[in-house]
Image (cartoon, rainbow, N blue to C red):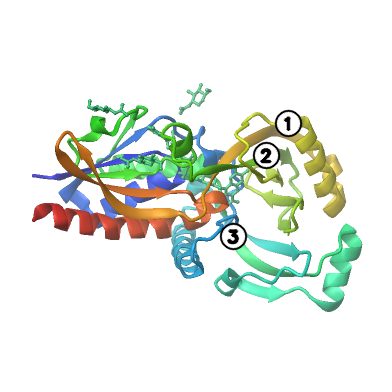
Amino acid sequence: MKRKIAVIGAGVIGLTAALKIQKEYGENIVVTIYTADKSPNTTGDVAAGLWAPHLVQDTPEDKILKWAKETQDFFWKLWKDGYALDAGISLQPVVNLLCDDTSIPKWSTIAIGCNEIKGKELERFKNDHKIPYTGGFTFTSFTCESTKFLPFLENIFINNGGQIKIKKIENFSQLKDYDVIINCTGIYSKILMSDNSVKAIRGQILRVEASWQFHTVIDDSDDGCYIIPNANCVILGGTHQLDDEDTKPRIEDATRIIKGCKQMIPSLHEAKVLRHQAGLRPGRDQIRLELTTINLGNKLVPVIHNYGHGGSGVTLCYGCAGEVVDLVKIALTKSKL
Ligand SMILES: Cc1cc2nc3c(=O)[nH]c(=O)nc-3n(C[C@H](O)[C@H](O)[C@H](O)COP(=O)(O)OP(=O)(O)OC[C@H]3O[C@@H](n4cnc5c(N)ncnc54)[C@H](O)[C@@H]3O)c2cc1C
Ligand SMILES: *[C@@H]1O[C@H](CO)[C@@H](O)[C@H](O)[C@H]1NC(C)=O
Ligand SMILES: *[C@@H]1O[C@H](CO)[C@@H](O)[C@H](O)[C@H]1NC(C)=O
Ligand SMILES: *[C@@H]1O[C@H](CO)[C@@H](O)[C@H](O)[C@H]1NC(C)=O
């Protein structure tokens, strides 16, 4: 008999996990996704989708590096195989500026073509932006647009024989017939299921028309702004308001973002605003990626948790999916005994 796996959530985390399981097990397993919402209504659909680990709190650095590298390789493969348009993937230069003597993060060692910004070049950015930067680095990175990437993954998943059911899971006993349950509920794990270790990190952005802007600029200071081009728009951000669950865009945030971005790239005063958006990053002290079991009607069912990716869900998705596959193997081996 085929083994049955249920994935809860069709955000970037749930979809990549579901696909990776299919890829590993092929015909031997049936994967069903249960989700309350799908693209274009997930958290990732608000994101700028830049590959760059960000707001991951105390998740161990070696894990971040591993998961980020595997995801970068995945984007690279899609890019190389000719799926840039379909999957919404672009490759572009990034200028990441630092304030308050913040050091260059460890993950820069796996970023493509990373160089430190110093000396005259740093002075130029300080003068141009009128911001007292203390350092910075440049690299080349992928942006991955969820509004294209998620439907792209959904199609592959369905072509592989997977099913997506639009259904909010209120009680896990609804899934008691499955051999393994994968919990990829993002911030909703807090709102719908009261995991109080998950805290919203609210992010507000604007999507603007600025066809001349071809590179990302990030001011990494506390209330710094960022400019990230996607294929058909440019994202201006942002905010990271802890424990704030308001998904309505606010005028005061938008005003601050526009002012900060124009200070860095003055020509943005010409940019037409297409859309204001706010989303909730699933913040947690650490990403939760572990195997547990739950008792559902006298049956112990393995549950793999995969949530709390903060500001890096896109950056880490494929690496985390690989770890889910490892845990599925352990779960299925145990349940056979
Ligand atoms: C403004 C902003 C900018 C960002 N920029 C970046 C960036 O540049 N790079 C980057 O890597 N990350 C970025 N992020 C973070 C990234 O978007 C998130 O980390 C990521 O989207 C989280 O994905 P997820 O699948 O865990 O959650 P979600 O996308 O929230 O998906 C959760 C899914 O679970 C479903 N669900 C929840 N509860 C239930 C239930 N009870 N029953 C059924 N279904 C349920 C939901 O319907 C949804 O489909 C940004 C986020 C924001 C808000
Ligand atoms: C997304 O949300 C909008 C507005 O609530 C809704 O009309 C639409 O059906 C949703 N789309 C999906 C795919 O869930
Ligand atoms: C979930 O459903 C089971 C079985 O129907 C029930 O015993 C349990 O109380 C329910 N749990 C919650 C939190 O509603
Ligand atoms: C799924 O994750 C949420 C959030 O942490 C948690 O409350 C819920 O109990 C988990 N589900 C199971 C079956 O363990």
Tell me if 109 is positioned left or right of 239 in this view: left
Give residue 248's quadrant in the image. top right
Instruction: Look at discs 1 and 3 and give the one toward the viewer.
Output: 1
Which three-letter amino acid code belongs to the residue tagged 2? Gln
Please tell me how crowded label 1 is: few (under 14), some (14-19), or many (20+) other residues with Cα within 10 Å: some
| Labelled disc at residue 52 | 3
Above or below: residue 329 compared with residue 149: below
Instruction: Measure the C-alpha gap from mark 1 to mark 2.
Output: 8 Å
Check the picture and name the quadrant holding the N terminus.
Answer: top left
Instruction: Measure the C-alpha gap from mark 1 to mark 3.
Output: 26 Å
Residue at position x 65%, y 68% in the image = 139
Above or below: residue 247 compared with residue 82: above
Helix, strand or loop for disc 2: strand
User: Where does the image place residue 69, in percent across and percent down from the top left?
Assistant: 48, 66
Task: Say which label, 2 or 3, has the lower sequence index.
Answer: 3
Residue at position x 28%, y 60% in the image = 326
Compare residues 147 and 226 and report the one nearer the observer.
226
Disc 2: which residue: 204
Compare residues 64 and 29 and report the one nearer the observer.
64
Check if mark 2's residue and mark 3's residue have beta carbons within 8 Å.
no
Compare residues 22 and 313 and report the one nearer the observer.
313
Disc 1: which residue: 250
